[in-house]
Amino acid sequence: MVDQKKGLDKAGRDRIPNQQELEKELSDYLSRKYGNRVKIISPLVFPRGDQAATDDTRTGPDSEGVPSFDMLPEELEAYLDGFIVRQDQPKAVLATKICTHFNRIKYAKKSDRKKTTRVGMIKNNVLMVGPTGVGKTYIIKLIAQKLGVPFVKGDATKFSETGYVGGDVEDLVRELVQDANDDIKLAENGIIYIDEIDKISSSQNLIGHDVSRTGVQRALLKPMEETEVDLKVAHDPISQIQAIEQYRRTGKKEKRVVNTKNILFIMSGAFGELTQIIRKRLQSQGIGFEADVRSAEVPWEILKEVTAKDLIDFGFESEFVGRLPIVVVFDELSKEDLLKILKNPNNPIIISKRLDFMAYGIDIKFEDEALMKIAEIAAAEKTGARGLVSAIEKALITFEKRLPRSGLKRFLVTLDVVEHPEAQLEMLLKNPEDLDRRERFERAKKRELENIKAYISKKAVDFSIEYGLEINERRLALIAELYLKNISDINTAFDDFIEMYSQIKLEEASLVEKLEVEVSFDESAIDEIIKQAIRTDQEAGHLALQLAERLEYGLKLVKDRSGIERFVINDEAVTDMDSFVNNLVKKFYHQDYSSEEYKLK
């Protein structure tokens, strides 16, 4: 009898509970742990067999979860050149080391060298040093976007050593999984960027260990090298609920962990006080940096002499510094640099402002003198590119508030607008159709188009190589038109052009099944179709189909008369279709023509 009871107890423990029982157990557990703050509401999902365990398996860009990476350092550097002003050395170093990092991962996966990986392999973690507003965060976001890898950004001041109040540094790894749409394999090849890292250096005036700061440094040591981070944490009800749901789907407990071996860590900070340490060292070595670093002006140039010893003296643990083998120092931006940023077609400051006003149907243009003044104001603030944002907002906020109601469709930002915004606004509202202002607007519009075309022309060779497509003068104008119409950066305009080109080619391939004649488009016809698509807001592929269908009847007459099997359409057929077909029919209807292909000219 006892044995029978034990057998029943064992069977009860091994039995998978039904839905009602499981929901009751879950509700009781959550109520005891979190009170009434957390409730579970779920669909009818029952435990399934072993096969269910693989139903939700997701793959990244390839079967191994590794990004499809084939970029070379010079290619990535050229991409960054289109967005980042100055900073030549940081761009070169970051492009090189980041490309090497991901290419090495790809090589290791391809050659299956997991078992032969040597102990002590160095990861290319990066420390970026430089003043605020010089593009440290921006450059890393651009790189992550270009590479297509998961990316998360954290602030070092918000983290604490595990067990203290504040965020856990391992939370960044969990956020990386979220950014990868819960694809762990993809997240294991992502980038974690931590800003304000100089704020967790231990105090130089403190006797003994600065526990709160050195603790965060030590907590970062293992993730920066290699460790496994459990996605389920005791203080996170969401991860616990996910684990419960996983058990409900599969009937099994699963430990989900993220290995940080291939996650690239990039740290950044201003490190203004580091200049004193470097200056003291250089002077002791007889190197003459005599500038008084205690003045309000921080001599940022001296940071280029930084060494690992300087960082340790600054308050970082030697083990922490050792895990950041790559140090790049950013240059302070001058007034001239800030002006170049404003004139760069890819700069998000002007693009954002164009979007702000276009939201109200207002086309905004800038005169060069206005941009120079904005750069001058920003340079005086000593906050780098961030000063550009505040300067331009201060000048244009009243216009952004009042012009939408005025019905004005064109707005020219002049030097007077920047220097005397209130007075210029009243003048504009009193005389919105001022002839001189309209002429200046048109000149600024024309000059902007020419500048964009010149900029695209410099990048044409790179884009031709990347896309395998010739970029001629006609296409330069079309890409510039796409840039202005869609209010995007140049790279996005190129992508838009390539997408329209591909639409036409796809439609061309399907015409064999849709028409009674074989039709293809030469490059001039494709360009003309794209031009019409831009100006009519229609799909390029749809326009190509419409063109072919309208040409079909006339081409069929020619085919029946001449025996021509294949027609290659040019731009003349696109611009004046009716006249073209009429002339074509007249030309061939009364003569013999035996060629299998005819290129329409």
Image: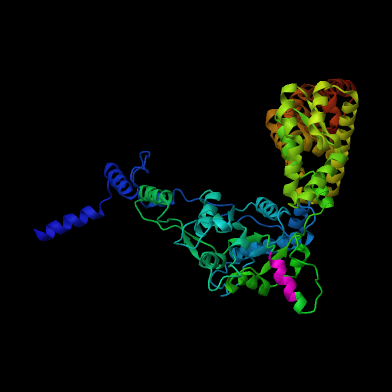
Q: Quadrant of residue 585?
A: top right
Question: Which quarter of the image is occupied by the N terminus?
Answer: bottom left
Query: Outermost residue toward the left?
Result: 1
Applied colour scheme: rainbow
Residue drawn at x 58%, y 53% is 152
Relative image position of residue 295 (x, y in whole percent):
76, 62
Residue drawn at x 67%, y 73% is 308
User: Is residue 576 found left or right of 172 in the rendered image?
Assistant: right
Relative image position of residue 348 (x, y in whole percent):
73, 43
Relative image position of residue 403 (x, y in whole percent):
74, 26
- Give the total number of marks visible in the rendering: 0
Question: Which quarter of the image is occupied by the C terminus?
Answer: top right
User: Is residue 31 found left or right of 545 in the rendered image?
Assistant: left
Residue drawn at x 64%, y 51% is 148
Query: Outermost residue toward the bottom?
Result: 285
| Residue 198 on the magenta segment | no
Residue 278 sits above or below residue 456 on the image: below
User: Is residue 229 found left or right of 421 in the rendered image?
Assistant: left
Kindly report the secondary structure that dominates the magenta region of the rendered protein: helix
Q: Quadrant of residue 363?
A: top right
Residue 498 sits above or below residue 184 on the image: above
Relative image position of residue 461 (x, y in whole percent):
83, 50
The answer, for residue 344, to whether it is visible in the render is: no
The answer, for residue 87, to whether it is visible in the render is: yes
Q: Nearer the viewer, residue 190 or 209?
A: 209
Give the magenta-colored segment's residue range.
Answer: 273-281
Residue drawn at x 68%, y 72% is 310
Q: Nearer the viewer, residue 214 or 83?
A: 214
User: Is residue 80 found left or right of 127 in the rendered image?
Assistant: right
| Residue 274 on the magenta segment | yes
Residue 285 sits above or below residue 579 on the image: below
